[in-house]
Amino acid sequence: DIRLTQSPSTLSASMGDRVTIACRASQNIGTSLAWYQQKPGKAPKLLISGVSNLESGVPSRFSGSGSGREFTLTITSLQPDDFATYFCQQYFTYLLTFGGGTKLEIK
Amino acid sequence: QVLLVQSGPEVKEPGASLKVSCEASGYRFTEYGIAWVRLAPGQGHEWIGWINTLTGKKTYAQSLQGRVTMTADTSMSTAQLVMRDVHSGDTAIYYCARGGMASSFDVWGQGTLITVS
């Protein structure tokens, strides 16, 4: 199975900050990568698919980049609603796998 | 509004079977597959498997193959997950999600907490 390693596991930031979350794949997955946001007790929300394609309704302060094995999720100008857990998912193969998650906390 | 609504939380004894249902509304059920994903305490998300709601074709995670069965009832727009012989390691929140066999998932159920104790 393809392993996805996210870093950092926890990130402390302040309102208005710019943050970056990394997701590294154990093998080349092309552009078959999605990012999700999840809050406690809630279902995951799809933010980005195909590395950089923002889902409808997702604020433009979210962006994704990368290809092959290295990917990043960037959030510019953090808002109160952004403090949550973020995780990546690969769909290069049908044996889907997920990153371990990054908890974004208020500093 | 596109929704996936799951059945409620359950407590199971070790060795029992768990069953989670996922009712779709707001779209044509057979146009999208349904995946099942779980999130265990302190762990990352784990893909359980996927079912093609039109053809009934299924793929399961190798680690769970033999204990898991997925079905889709097109007349009820409902997908179901059954897991047999559960143990404490199966304690998790179970989610259904809409998407293809190898895709991202744009709609998720609210989650079903299954506790094995």
Image (cartoon, coloured by chain):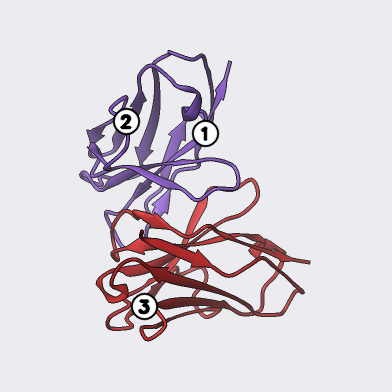
Question: Which chain is painted in red?
Answer: B
For the residue marked with disc 1, what is the amino acid?
A: Ala
Above or below, B10 against A105 in this view is: below
For image coordinates 44% across by 68% down, the residue present is: B61
For the residue marked with disc 2, what is the amino acid?
A: Pro
For the residue marked with disc 3, what is the amino acid?
A: Lys
**Left or right of A47 in this view: A13:** right
Q: CA distance from mark 3 to mark 1?
A: 32 Å
Secondary-structure class at tag 3: strand
Which chain is home to disc 1? A
Image disc number at residue A84? 1
Do circles 3 and 2 both sit on a common chain?
no
Residue assigned mark 3: B58
Residue assigned mark 2: A59
The quadrant where residue B59 appears: bottom left
**Left or right of A64 in this view: B51:** right
Above or below, B5 against A25 in this view is: below
Which chain is home to disc 3? B
Above or below, B108 against A105 in this view is: below
For image coordinates 46% across by 72% down, the residue present is: B23
Do circles 3 and 1 both sit on a common chain?
no
Secondary-structure class at tag 2: loop
**The C terminus of chain B lies in quadrant:** bottom right
Frontmost residue, B23 versus B63: B23
Residue furthest to the front in view is: B1
List x then y, in percent, for residue A69: 28, 38
Above or below, B41 against B16 in this view is: above
